[in-house]
Amino acid sequence: MTTTPPSGVPGDWTVDDRCFNCDAARQLAPGLIRERDGRSELARQPRDDAERRQLYAAAHACPTRSIRPAGGRLEPGTDPFPLALDDGLLLLGHNSPRTAGANSYLLRRPDGWIMVDTPRFAESLAARYEALGPVTDVLLTHRDHAEHGRAWADRLGARLWIHEGDLDAAPTADRVLRGTDPVEVAPGVVAHPFPGHTRGSVLYLADERHLFTGDTLHWSRTDEDIAVFETIVWHSVLELSASLDRTVDALRFEWLLPGHGERRRMPADEAARRLRALAERCRTLRPAPVDFAAVRW
């Protein structure tokens, strides 16, 4: 393991070579961490306290703990998570290598909180979430993010949800979504089964405001638009396109909240327009081998 950034940036902060390019750190510290040769590297040292806080957030989110300040130790007092994104919406950080470094969220509802996908499992994190109030449900968007679902649901006394298409990844789930019809899983929260990335992929739409998309939809910095990860579709890109065509008119939202890829807030009318254009583009996609190196963040 080397801790010298390829860019040769001198200073206290470093990024080592264990990074597997999940993109979480670049979302939290844009301009400070960049991608090169399929991994993150330090672009420059922080210039002020605000930028140091960004790097601490990236460090506490990083699933490989590759981002380190001087001395290499991350003190608990530098951990900003859960991090508020919107009223009643928290980003959990502490991304897990067992979910490929996926982002996860807490969403406040009238009777408690809902966890969408999961961070790494740790008792210290569970105590933080309990202090916020009860967590009633853990919603899994698909099989790639299921690793810690049962542990979190049991620890928090919550119901674990997954779609039947990915049930073998969470066979003890308490609630199983079936078919492709939308289902209300909690007041104001609708599950939209969305086969494509995996057979059991699901989008969760809350209050026509927050859309949790797993690995199905994300904001692409490269394209400056809503996009799909067309080069890492495990099940069927043709079914992904069909899912988008079937669901596009029902997905009215302001926040795009993926497991992988950039988050984005935009007016609902803009989101609807961009989603319709994406559906049109996706009709031209054809099956191809999975290629992680071709991912365009």
Image (cartoon, rainbow, N blue to C red):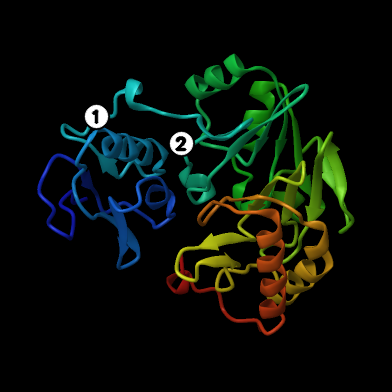
With respect to residue 63, does 21 lie above or below? Answer: below
Residue at coordinates 18% horizontally, 54% vertically from top-left? 5
Other-residue count near label 1 (Cα within 10 Å), few / some / many at <14 / 14–19 / ≥20: few
Of the residues under marks 1 and 2, which one precedes in the sequence? 1
Viewer-nearest residue: 14 or 162: 14
- Residue 222, position as x, y percentages in the image: 45, 69
Residue at coordinates 24% horizontally, 49% vertically from top-left? 16
Distance from disc 1 to disc 2, alpha carbons, whole Å, reads 15 Å
Residue at coordinates 82% horizontally, 38% vertically from top-left? 188
Image-based side of 279 in relation to 293, left or right: right
Q: Circle 2 is placed at which residue position?
A: 94
With respect to residue 224, does 186 lie above or below? Answer: above
Q: Which mark is residue 44?
A: none
With respect to residue 103, does 262 lie above or below? Answer: below
Viewer-nearest residue: 89 or 124: 89
Residue at coordinates 42% horizontally, 39% vertically from top-left? 61
Other-residue count near label 2 (Cα within 10 Å), few / some / many at <14 / 14–19 / ≥20: many
Image-based side of 41 in relation to 64, left or right: left
Viewer-nearest residue: 189 or 273: 273
Image-based side of 13 in relation to 22, left or right: left
Q: Circle 1 is placed at which residue position?
A: 73
Disc 1 marks which amino acid?
Answer: Arg
The quarter of the displayed image where residue 55 is located: top left
The quarter of the displayed image where residue 241 is located: bottom right
Identify the element where label 1 is drawn.
loop
With respect to residue 239, does 212 lie above or below? Answer: above
* Residue at the extreme left: 10
Is the residue under label 2 in contact with that under label 1 (CB below 8 Å)?
no
- Residue 98, position as x, y percentages in the image: 51, 46
Identify the element where label 2 is drawn.
loop
